[in-house]
Structures are given as structure tokens and as C-alpha cells.
Image: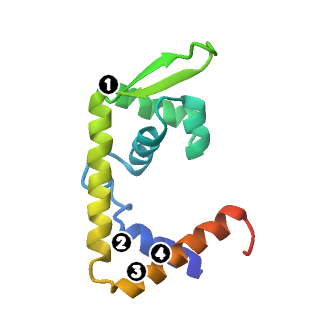
Amino acid sequence: MQFRQFNRFYTNIMGYIGRHVLETEFSLPEGRLLHELGKNAPCTMKSISDELQMDAGYLSRIIKKFESMGLLTKTRSETDGRAQVLTLTEAGRRCVDEVNRASSAQIEKLLEPVPEEAREVLLRDMAEIEALLSSGKGL
């Protein structure tokens, strides 16, 4: 119950419950995809689907939307004709940069009233939570 309460608190405080994230036109899954493309593009649809654990059909719809917005291109892999390679366009890279700046600003604003010592504790505890949940141990 406490885990679910924290999850609700966190998604609310970060503004993830609303239709769009960071006052952009993007939903949370779209924002996550943009973030991953910013880190990994060019990459295959399969690798992004695996990384985000996102349904391939849903991912495909978002990619089509991004293509129509001019944010990315999709081409066949030269090494595997079945694979689709995703590459950000210049507009896509600018969009990723804007979303990253908005995210950083949101976090800075959220942490502004938190004393420096408490921030260090918070970040350490967040790293511990991530480590425990990633390893599957300790819970």
C-alpha cells in the first residue's frame, strides 16, 4: 500500500497524470520515446520497443505520428531487411533538447526548497531504490 501511495504521489507531483508532459504536446509514452531516441538514435524499432517495454503496435503509431511531425525518419536496415532504423531529424533533435531542458527546469523547481543535505539523501535513496528494483533483490 505504501508503495502505491508513493507512486501516486510521485506521478502527481511530476505532472504525469495529465494528458501531456512538461506542458508539451506529448503524452508520457511519447515523451519517453523522444528521450530514448535522443539517447540511442539511430536505432531499430525492436531495440526501442525492448528498451521501453512498449507494445510494438502502440510504438508504431507513435512513430508514425513523429514521422508526420517531421521529428524522425524510418528506413530499412542495410544489414537486416526486416528491421526499421529510426533516426531523429534536426527538428527531432531540437525537440528532444527542448523537452530535456523543460524536464531539468521542472526538477530544479521541485528541488529548490529542499536543503542541500536533504537533496543528497534524496538522490542517494533514489539510487538505492533503482538498484533494488533493477536487481530484483531485496524486495
Query: Could you tell which of marks 3 and 1 lies nearer the N-terminus?
Result: 1
Q: Which mark is residue 119?
A: 3
Residue at mark 4: 123
106 displayed left or right of 34: left
Q: Earlier in the sequence, mark 2 or mark 1?
A: 2
The local secondary structure at tag 3 comes to helix
Instruction: State which quarter of the image contains the C terminus.
Output: bottom right
> In 3D space, how far apart are the residues under numbered discs 3 and 2 (Cα atoms)?
16 Å
- The mark that comes first in sequence, 2 or 4, is 2
Q: Secondary structure at mark 2?
A: helix
Report how far apart the C-alphas of labels 2 and 1 lie in the structure.
32 Å
Where on the picture, by quarter, is residue 64? top left
Q: Quadrant of the N terminus?
A: bottom right
Give the residue at mark 1: 68
Q: Is residue 23 above or below residue 64?
A: below
Name the element at disc 1. helix
Q: Please report whichever mark, 4 or 1, sits nearer to the chain's N-terminal start.
A: 1
- Whole-Å distance between the Cαs marked 2 and 4? 17 Å
Q: Alpha-carbon neighbours of circle 4 within 10 Å: few (<14), some, or many (≥20)?
A: few
Instruction: Quote the CA–CA distance across marks 4 and 1.
Output: 38 Å
Q: Residue tagged by mark 2?
A: 13
Question: In whole angstroms, how far apart are the C-alphas of marks 4 and 3?
Answer: 6 Å
Q: Nearer the viewer, mark 2 or mark 4?
A: 4
